[in-house]
Image: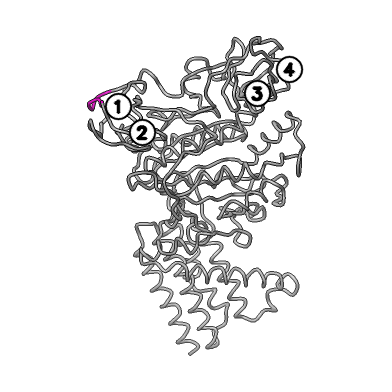
Amino acid sequence: MGEAVVKRIEGPIIISKNTRDIEMNEEVRIGDENLVGEVIRINGEESMIQVYEDTTGLEPGIKIFGTGKPLSVELGPGIISNTFDGIQRPLAIIREKQGIFIKRGAIVPALLRDKKWKVDIKVNKGDEVFPNSIIGEVEETSLVKHRILIPPGIAGKVVEVEKSSDYRITDTICLVERADGKREEIKLFHSWPVRKKRPFLERIPPEEIMFTGQRVIDSVFPIAKGGVAAIPGGFGTGKTVTQHSLAKWSDVDIIIYIGCGERGNEMAQVLEEFPALKDPRSGKSLMERTILIANTSNMPVTARESSIYTGITMAEYFRDMGYDVALFADSTSRWAEALREISGRMEQMPAEKGFPAYLSSRLAEFYERGGRVKVAEDRIGSVSIVGAVSPPGGDFSEPVTSHTKRFISTFWVLDRDLAYSRHYPAISWTESYSGYLDRVSSWWESKGLSNKELRDKLMAVLLLDSHLREIVQLVGEGALPERERLTLRKAELIKESFLQQSSLSAIDGYCGPEKQYRMLKTIFDFGDGAEDLLKIGVPLFKIEELPVFSEIKRMKEEIGNDDLHKFDELVSRIEENFSDLRKEYG
C-alpha cells in the first residue's frame, strides 16, 4: 500500500487515499507546510479531513502524515493571560516570529518550553495519588495558583518525586507506579483531546449565584455557578457589551472568552480592552485570570468549529483544580454556521435552514460540559457557560436559538426596541427567564436580603404595566384611574432607575448585592406610600412633583456601593415629603 496522499480538495475539506493507518478524529499534517487537519470520516482506505488552515494551492498527491493522537490542547502553566487561536496556537508568539498574519503551517507549541516555573511540590514519596490529585503548585500570575494535576486515567503510588524548585513544563517532577507495575512520568503539563469531556466524581446542583453586578441579571434573571445561559439578540442589541460586562464583574476565579467567528474589529476591541481592564476584586489587570481565544470570521471556518471545544477543555481543566470558571462564547451562531458549511462540504443531508441534523446534539454536548462538580479530594469546581446567539433578523424561531433553549436554564433575550431606545442592558423582562431563581434564593437570604419577595413584586408591576400600555395606546393615559397611572409611574422607576444600567459608569457599572436590594426596596417603599396617599385623596400629580421622585431616578448614579447609608437619608426624605402631603390632605 502506498503513502497517504491527497486525492481531492473541496475548500477546507480534503479527501485522502491510502490512509488505512490513520484513525477517526486523529490529528494529521498535510504537505511540506505541515498544515493542521483532523480526520472526520473514514471510508475504507479513503478519509475525509477537515483542515484548520487555508487550503489554497494544495494539489492532489501531497503527502499526509498522522500524528497518532486526536486533536488536543496542552494544559499546564502558561495558559493564563495568553491569547490563542481556535486550535491553541499562541498568537503573541506567532506575531513575534512571523508578523501579524498567521502563515500557513505555523507550528508553534501552545506553552513555552524554555521558561522555568517555580514549583511548590505537594506530595511525598510513597503517597497514593489519583486522577486530578494535586502534586504541586505554580504561581502562574499574582491572581492564579496553577495546580499541577495527576492526569485523568492515572492512579498509583509516588515512587519518585523532585524537590520544590524551578522546572520547565517538559521536566518530569513525579514518577507514579500503577497497580500493574507500570510507571508514569508526570510533567508540569499534559495534553487532552478537545472533543472528550474530562471526567469527574459527582455532579452537584448549582445553588450559589454567579454574581455579576448587573441588576437585571442578579436580581431578576440570575445564573448560578455551574449554570448555563444564552444571550440571543439581533445586530446592535448589545450581546458583546453584555458579555464584556459579565466577564469583567462576575465573581469567578477564571474567565475564558471565545471570539468565535465574530468580526475582526470586534475581536480587536476585545484584545485591546481586556488587558487594560482592572480586576475589580484585586485592582490588578483582568488578564491575570483571563484566557482569550480569537477566531474571527476571516479565519478558516474549520478552526472556528474547533475553538468552542478548545475553550471548554481549558475551562474543565481549571475546574478540576477547584476553581469557578466562566466561559463566554461569542457567538454559538457563528460556530453553528461553521458546522453547516462543513456539513455541506461533506455532502450530508441538510435539515432545517441548511443546518446539519446533528446540530441539536452538538449544542447539547457543548452545554452539557458546564456544571458544578466534585472532582477529587472533596474539591469542588464549576464551569458556567454563557453563549451569545445571533439569530438572523432577530428571528428567535431559527434552529440555533430554538435548540439552544432546550439545553440552557437561563435565557437573557436582548430586545431590539429597548436597545434602540438606549435602554441597556437591553434584556427583555417579558421574554427572559431563569431556572435558578429558587436555587439561589438561599444565597440572598444568607446575606439577610429577602430578594425573592421584591423580585416577585417587580415582575407583577412590569406585567401589569405591559397590560396597561396596551390600553393607553387605545384610549390614552388620562382615561386610566389614578391608581393604575401610579402603576405606570412605579414601572417607570423600575425600568429607568433599576433595570437600566450603564456599563461605562464608574458608579453604576457594578452594583453590589446590598445596593441592589436597597434600590429595589426604596422603589417599592415609595410606591406603597404613594398608594396610601391616593387613598386619602392626594392627586397623583402632587406625588410626581415631589423632589424625591427624581431623586429615586438618580440614585443609581448618586449612591455608590460604599455609600449605602445614603439610602437611609433618601428614605427619610421620602417619609418627610409624604408626611407633608398627609398633613395637607389629611
Q: Residue at x 58, y 76 (%)?
A: 486
What whole-number distance in Å separates the C-alpha atoms at marks 4 and 3?
11 Å
Residue identifier under label 2: 150
Under mark 4, the amino acid is: Arg
What whole-number distance in Å separates the C-alpha atoms at marks 2 and 4?
42 Å
Q: In the rendered view, would you say 502 is above or below 268?
A: below
- The answer to the question of whether label 4 and label 3 lie on touching residues, with beta carbons closer than 8 A, is no
Q: Earlier in the sequence, mark 4 or mark 1?
A: 4
On the image, the x and y values in percent for residue 300 come to: 64, 26
What whole-number distance in Å separates the C-alpha atoms at marks 1 and 3?
37 Å
Under mark 2, the amino acid is: Ile
What whole-number distance in Å separates the C-alpha atoms at marks 4 and 1?
47 Å
Location of the N terminus by quadrant is: top right
Left or right: residue 509 compared with residue 281: right
Residue identifier under label 3: 49
- The answer to the question of whether label 3 and label 2 lie on touching residues, with beta carbons closer than 8 A, is no
Residue identifier under label 4: 8
What whole-number distance in Å separates the C-alpha atoms at marks 2 and 1?
10 Å
Q: Residue at x 40, y 72 (%)?
A: 571
Residue identifier under label 1: 174
Under mark 3, the amino acid is: Ile
